[in-house]
Amino acid sequence: MRHLIATAGNGRIENFLKNDWYKSLKENVDLSKTDVLVIDYGLNSVPEGVIVFKAVERDGLINNTRFLNLALFLEEHPEYDQILFCDGGDVIFQKDISHLFEEHRDSFRAVIERLSPPIDLLVKEEDLIDGEEIKSFLSKKRLFNVGVILAPRDGFLKLAAEMKKRLRNMNVWGGDTVIGNYVIYKNRHVVLPPKYNFIPSTARERFYVKNSKFYLWNGELIPIVHNAGRYKVLRPIVNFGYGEGKNKINRINVWLFKVLFSLANLFKRK
């Protein structure tokens, strides 16, 4: 059996996917037991050596439908037992993470955001089937960031099935977060250390950038960095990517995200 690292993308993130996401993955992660999959939503070209799967499910946001397409691929390829599924337009790898495939193999593995938006800000109940039950179940829980998830193949098949069953509006932003968290919490799961999906805008750990690389304050190189944010202008890292001359911290955006999320959660508890 082999492992799989997968992502999805269209022409908008094509340059980053090839020159930052894949380059950082290839240079820093042991891929001797792992294949790389790109779910193609309209790419003009893909990195040499990756597996390409043309997206079949396209009715909705890529963030949501990518899980359906991953399931279609896995159904055709039973040779993959452990999968890491991640964003392809705002994630870089700085250190080997292949050991994660061999740990907690029967569980979902993901990072919980130290600061995350209240569930009510993500989707409306009418966007979901059984929306009241889902949002009630998640209301007191801290949310996993679904930009980087590890799971056995059956876990991703379950996630896709629930996505198709419970997400009424495939065009809603945040649908992947809500359904993803619902499925993860309903199944066996393990919380990964923040360094395996380090989000500068919400992380509580202090960090710094030196020579375009991200480090924790103790000098440890961060394995996976995720410049998360719905809108590029609001993301915490300017010129984010892999290589020299990149990665300037926008401290105003980092501060703004933390204040807004903290206030939103404070009012939610009242």
Image (tube, rainbow, N blue to C red):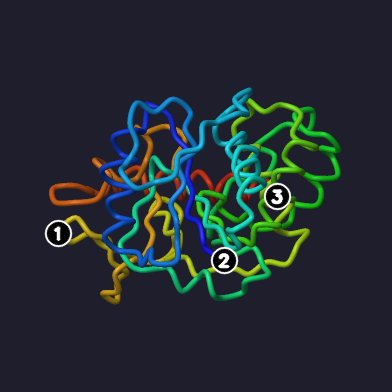
From this view, report whether residue 44 is shown above or below residue 214. above
In 3D space, how far apart are the residues under numbered discs 1 and 3 (Cα atoms)?
Answer: 40 Å
Between discs 1 and 3, the one toward the N terminus: 3
Circle 3 SS class: helix
- Asked whether the beta carbons under mark 2 and mark 3 sit within 8 Å of each other, the answer is no
Q: Amino acid at mark 1?
A: Asn
Of badges 1 and 3, the one in the foreground is: 3
Numbered circle sitting on residue 157:
3
Query: Tag 2: Cα neighbours inside 10 Å, few (<14), some, or many (≥20)?
Result: few
**What residue is rendered at 38% in x and 44% in y?**
90
* Viewer-side residue, 182 vs 5: 5
Circle 2 SS class: loop
- Could you tell me residue 93's position as x and y percent? 34, 58
- Could you tell me residue 218's position as x and y percent? 29, 76
Numbered circle sitting on residue 1:
2
Left or right: 42 as drawn, with respect to 109: left
* Viewer-side residue, 118 vs 230: 230
* Viewer-side residue, 131 vs 91: 91
Between discs 2 and 1, the one toward the N terminus: 2
**Label 1: which residue?**
211
Q: Amino acid at mark 2?
A: Met
**What residue is rendered at 57% in x and 66% in y?**
1
Left or right: 250 as drawn, with respect to 178: left
- Could you tell me residue 169's position as x and y percent? 71, 26
**What residue is rendered at 44% in x and 34% in y?**
9
Numbered circle sitting on residue 201:
none
Circle 1 SS class: loop
- Could you tell me residue 106's position as x and y percent? 68, 70
